[in-house]
Image (spheres, grey):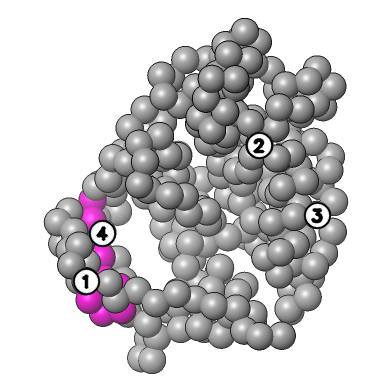
Amino acid sequence: MGGLERAHGLDLLQHRERSLRTGGFDGEGAEIREGLAELPAYRIDRDFGQSLALALLDLLVGDVVEAIAADDRRERAHIDYGDFQWAATGERLTAETFARYRKSDPAGGVVIFVIPESAVDAAVLDPQVAIASDGLPMDRPNVHPRGAGSFSRVPRLYVRERRLIGLKTALAKMTIVPARRLEKIAPAMARKGRVQVGADADLVVFDPETVRDNATHEMPLRASTGYRYVLVGGVIMNENGAIDRTRFPGVGTKRSTP
């Protein structure tokens, strides 16, 4: 598993803990401090009805500092320069190329292969885990493929090919599970993740036998396939791969005021 990072930036561990806190989660992210390789998922105590919630680390996110290049940081995180891939070229890095790119292109993207597949599998199988993906800018070429492929990867890889979970379970983890987790702090989520009268008509019609993520680190914007319709607020925005770029029916979801 790889996460797209910047070759120079804030401390990854501090960044992730800070983002969790500012996102409204007040509990201690204790496992974050134990080292990246030991984290199949974040475990955060919640104050809105669930004592424990798990956010799947399908693909590691954050910022990588120059300090991570230091021997003590790399040893603690169980990573080496060979675990870094320069996104623009696909090359695995060495100490020399890491230093060169960090100096010449500090905002350049790198893919970091950190989390073992077994850890991701354990998270996918955990009934408490919701499957989600952070959104990244889609207006530049070297973004992370999770932006275009995360929610197609789940039915393709974990349901159809590896048969780790059933389709209904996979769909629940991507819809009703996160909606229920968030609805107490974001009331609009009570209308999400459900197909019923009064709910927002955000709907996807797809073929479970053909749905597939096609985005890669080399071609991160390649669209997924296997979808017949995508509706946002009852408006058809994608029909058989043809995207309507003239309408914007989506409405932002805001946290309620404390």
- At 17% from the left and 63% from the top, the residue drawn is 244
Cα separation between marks 2 and 4: 39 Å
Determine which residue is flagged by label 4.
206
Q: Residues within 10 Å of mark 3 (few under 14, many from 20)?
A: some
Q: Residues within 10 Å of mark 4 (few under 14, many from 20)?
A: some
Q: Is 236 located above or below residue 169 in the figure?
A: below
Sequence-wise, the earlier of marks 1 and 3 is: 3
Cα separation between marks 1 and 4: 22 Å
Look at label 3 and name its amino acid: Gly
**Closer to us: mark 3 or mark 4?**
3
Sequence-wise, the earlier of marks 2 and 1 is: 2
Determine which residue is flagged by label 1.
247
Q: Is 35 located above or below residue 197 in the figure?
A: above
Sequence-wise, the earlier of marks 3 and 4 is: 3
**Closer to us: mark 1 or mark 4?**
1
Q: Residues within 10 Å of mark 2 (few under 14, many from 20)?
A: some
